[in-house]
Image: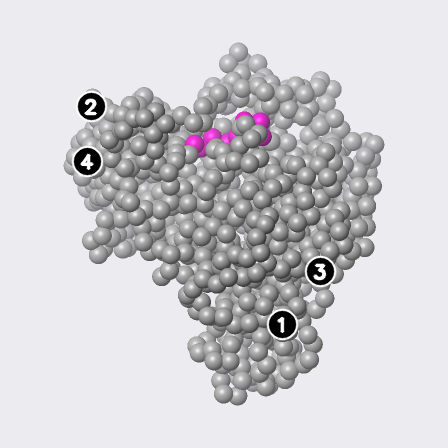
């Protein structure tokens, strides 16, 4: 087993000290050096040595498109250049001559057997972010991090899990974001073996021993084995960096619209009666929801791809009946297969030899929910085909998605290191971090085969770089306390910047007993997160919104309805992510690059897209909090007033609202009317124009509508409008230009925060004057009213 608090140290590595342009030399060994670049400042460095690293075990690897030819030891990008010196140092330099990243001669690349590392100079002004999923402070200075997927509750002391910090976590993404002032660069280790990234001072590591170590401050990145491959990306802003990185590793495919709704789950839901009772309560309380989730109890003895004959005697009928009422059923799938002769999944798998082997050449066995359990070897094409076939038949029952759990892989008390891959020929560590990705890929194939032309939805607990192309991810088993609520913000932000935009925590906490106030605060904080699910464990108190007081139900429902009201805005952020790589949940410095130095470390506020900011209360006590307002003007929704930015303000806690801000100039598409269920009409929207009376300039947005379910949008089945609004003497002036019309007309109603006499809508050569209609509309509080104008269609 791995010791997570022990790490590489450069003193035990031999470093290359010569470079002739094609080869790095270290002592009596040589490494073929490959460097490449692109015009948008992506740089790739890779070392090859067939004796040390004879095989490439990467299942997913980025590909640089439109590479520029590299000169000897130099790769030139658009605004920077990367150079390897003749004495094996390295520099990344901007076209203005600034050194963005450097490594000392003969101290850049080192090896120790099959292990390797890169070492860079660290300056005092550097700040660090990213690293995927880490249950640690948002800014990553001062410690070393491991990359090895774990079952957190099984592999860490529970005191750390419940009230402290821990590392590693469920997802391994060795991607470090380095900030210096207003400039950001990214470093990706493209290697799936167990790895480490350290940003800490040597003195910090030795203080407990009373030792004063004199070692230069450095950034260390390395892996235990595998081909040394490093991508270096120059932003220079965080938003540019994120878009470049996301496109490099692959954007997340557009999910079905229902996956962006509210999801209700609990370990313990198992039967048709449970699901129908849940649907009844949601309808009774006019509580919008899309997903009703089934945990492991729906299975027959925890056998994957089966149903308990007593709890779900007619799964297809149950799924069809609830879908008729507007609900999607999302069942859990675990990779472990019960070792049970006579059980079809086990028998066919054993006959086809699709299970992982141990060093003795027999099936590796762990102990998880079914008892003695074998594990599919997803590195084999035949295994993936076998699994996808069972998944296809399972999804043909009527399920439109699933969540895949225990795919770290979790083996219970059994050491997973004896689990070998590729017919028992390959060491466990080579594919451990890739196991969840391969399972997601095979499961997605089965879902696509079951429902052709329908967008798949999978939610995965574990993953690695590349997994974002196959599944959304939740942040695993958390705990019902305010420490986990607060950590969830930074964890989701860093995941988003690390290429996993579709993520979110279990709202309310999975372990322990959620209090009423905690559920309220968590629902308010996460109501606009990319993924929004209330989930808890068996044996905890009931956590459904109606399990608390009527006041709690009303408040949580208000913010779930807010999410459904803003679904057109959220959905278009997902469209932009797929097309450009933009993050959905963002830190403040993402959209205000000129203020990055002062905003980057704020971990209790965030942006949802470029126009909405939240500053939730994340502590159990306290009547006030400080809120950073970036420059510009902001409309505070919970107070109904415009306020100037570029400063900090103090806001008071009100249980029925949350500090929510609209940025000046925002054009927010939303669903008008009362929200009492999960209806979604993307072709009938309101457009909230956040234009103050003294506004100067022109606001723009791009709005797209499609069926929210199929892949027809890839074949022209989408309508896209380019909208612009400015303030003129006569009132607001709006223009709408149809870019694509494959989904028909969009009916749009203009809403404003100020009372204007009219809105002039220009569509091509036609102008119409839209007059105000009195219909109060409220958002996250009761302090202001939107002003509604007459509706119009983009085709009339």
Q: Is residue 149 magenta?
A: yes
Mark 3: secondary structure: loop
**Where residue 388 appears, x then y in whole percent?**
62, 35
**Where residue 432 appears, x then y in whole percent?**
49, 28
* Mark 1 or 3: the one toward you: 1
Q: Is residue 347 magenta?
A: no
Residue corresponding to mark 4: 105
Task: Check residue 534 in the rendering and tell me which mark sits there, or answer none.
Answer: none
Task: Check residue 27 in the rendering and tell me which mark sits there, or answer none.
Answer: 2
Q: Earlier in the sequence, mark 1 or mark 2?
A: 2
* Mark 1 or 2: the one toward you: 1
Q: How many marks?
A: 4
Q: Earlier in the sequence, mark 1 or mark 3?
A: 3
Mark 4: secondary structure: loop
C-alpha separation, residue under disc 4 versus residue under disc 2:
15 Å
In which image quadrant can residue 34 be found? Answer: top left
Report the span colored magenta.
146-155
Residue corresponding to mark 3: 679
Residue corresponding to mark 1: 784
């Amino acid at each position: 087993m791995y010791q997570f608090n022990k790490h590489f140290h450069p003193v035990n590595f031999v470093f290359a000290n010569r470079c002739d342009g094609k080869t790095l030399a270290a002592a009596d060994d040589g490494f073929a050096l490959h460097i490449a670049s692109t015009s948008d400042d992506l740089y790739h460095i890779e070392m090859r040595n067939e004796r040390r690293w004879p095989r490439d075990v990467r299942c997913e690897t980025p590909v640089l498109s439109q590479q520029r030819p590299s000169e000897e030891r130099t790769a030139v990008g658009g605004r920077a250049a990367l150079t390897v010196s003749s004495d094996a140092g390295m520099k990344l330099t901007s076209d203005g001559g600034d050194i963005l990243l450097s490594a000392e001669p003969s101290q850049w690349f080192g090896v120790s057997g099959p292990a390797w590392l890169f070492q860079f100079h660290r300056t005092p002004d550097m700040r660090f972010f990213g690293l995927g999923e880490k249950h640690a402070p948002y800014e990553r200075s001062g410690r070393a991090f491991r990359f090895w997927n774990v079952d957190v509750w099984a592999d860490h002391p529970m005191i750390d899990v419940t009230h402290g910090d821990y590392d590693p976590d469920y997802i391994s993404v060795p991607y470090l974001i380095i900030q210096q002032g207003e400039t950001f660069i990214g470093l990706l280790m493209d290697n799936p073996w167990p790895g480490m990234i350290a940003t800490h001072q040597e003195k910090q590591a030795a203080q407990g021993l009373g030792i004063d170590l004199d070692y230069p401050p450095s950034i260390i990145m390395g892996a235990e084995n595998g081909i040394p491959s490093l991508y270096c990306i120059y932003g220079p802003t965080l938003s540019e960096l994120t878009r470049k990185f996301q496109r490099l590793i692959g954007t997340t495919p557009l999910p079905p619209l229902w996956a962006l709704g509210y999801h209700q789950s609990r370990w313990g839901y198992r039967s048709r009666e449970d699901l129908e009772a849940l649907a009844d309560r949601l309808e009774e309380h006019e509580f919008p929801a899309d997903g009703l989730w089934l945990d492991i109890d729906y299975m027959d003895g925890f056998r994957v791809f089966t149903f308990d004959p007593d709890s779900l005697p007619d799964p297809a009928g149950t799924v069809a009946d609830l879908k008729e009422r507007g609900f999607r059923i999302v069942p859990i799938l675990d990779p472990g297969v019960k070792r049970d002769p006579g059980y079809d999944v086990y028998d066919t798998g054993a006959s086809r030899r699709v299970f992982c082997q141990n060093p003795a050449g027999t099936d590796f066995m762990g102990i998880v929910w079914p008892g003695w359990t074998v594990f599919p070897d997803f590195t084999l094409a035949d295994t993936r085909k076998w699994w996808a076939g069972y998944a296809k038949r399972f999804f043909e029952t009527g399920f439109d998605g699933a969540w895949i759990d225990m795919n770290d892989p979790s083996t219970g008390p059994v050491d997973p290191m004896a689990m070998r891959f590729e017919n028992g020929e390959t060491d466990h560590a080579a594919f451990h971090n890739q196991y969840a990705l391969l399972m997601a890929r095979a499961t997605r194939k089965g879902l696509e085969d079951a429902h052709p032309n329908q967008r798949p939805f999978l939610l995965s607990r574990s993953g690695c770089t590349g997994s974002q192309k196959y599944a959304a991810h939740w942040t695993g088993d958390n705990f019902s306390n305010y420490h986990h609520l607060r950590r969830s913000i930074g964890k989701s932000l860093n995941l988003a910047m690390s290429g996993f935009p579709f993520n979110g925590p279990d709202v309310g906490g999975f372990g322990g007993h959620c209090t009423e106030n905690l559920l309220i605060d968590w629902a308010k904080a996460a109501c606009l997160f990319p993924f929004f699910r209330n989930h808890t464990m068996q044996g905890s108190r009931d956590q459904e919104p109606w399990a608390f007081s009527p006041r709690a139900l009303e408040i949580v429902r208000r913010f779930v309805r807010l999410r459904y009201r803003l679904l057109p805005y959220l959905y278009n952020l997902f469209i932009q992510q797929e097309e450009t790589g933009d993050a959905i949940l963002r830190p403040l410095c993402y959209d205000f690059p000129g203020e990055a130095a002062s905003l980057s470390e704020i971990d209790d506020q965030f942006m949802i897209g470029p126009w909405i900011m939240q500053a939730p209360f994340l502590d159990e006590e306290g009547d006030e909090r400080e809120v950073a307002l970036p420059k510009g003007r902001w409309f505070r929704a919970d107070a109904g007033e415009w306020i100037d930015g570029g400063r900090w303000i103090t806001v008071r806690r009100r249980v029925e609202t949350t500090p929510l801000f609209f940025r000046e100039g925002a054009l927010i598409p939303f669903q008008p009317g009362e929200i009492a269920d999960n209806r979604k009409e993307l072709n009938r929207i309101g457009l909230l124009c956040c234009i103050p009376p003294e506004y100067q300039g022109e606001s723009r947005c791009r709005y797209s509508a499609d069926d929210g379910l199929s892949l027809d949008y890839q074949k022209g089945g989408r309508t896209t409008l380019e909208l612009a609004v400015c303030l003129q003497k006569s009132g607001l002036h709006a223009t709408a230009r149809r870019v694509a019309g494959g989904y028909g007309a969009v009916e749009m109603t203009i809403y404003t925060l100020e009372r204007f006499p009219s809105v002039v809508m220009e569509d091509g050569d036609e102008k119409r004057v839209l007059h105000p209609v009195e219909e109060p509309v409220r958002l996250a509080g009761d302090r202001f009213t939107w002003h509604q104008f007459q509706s119009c269609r983009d085709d009339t």
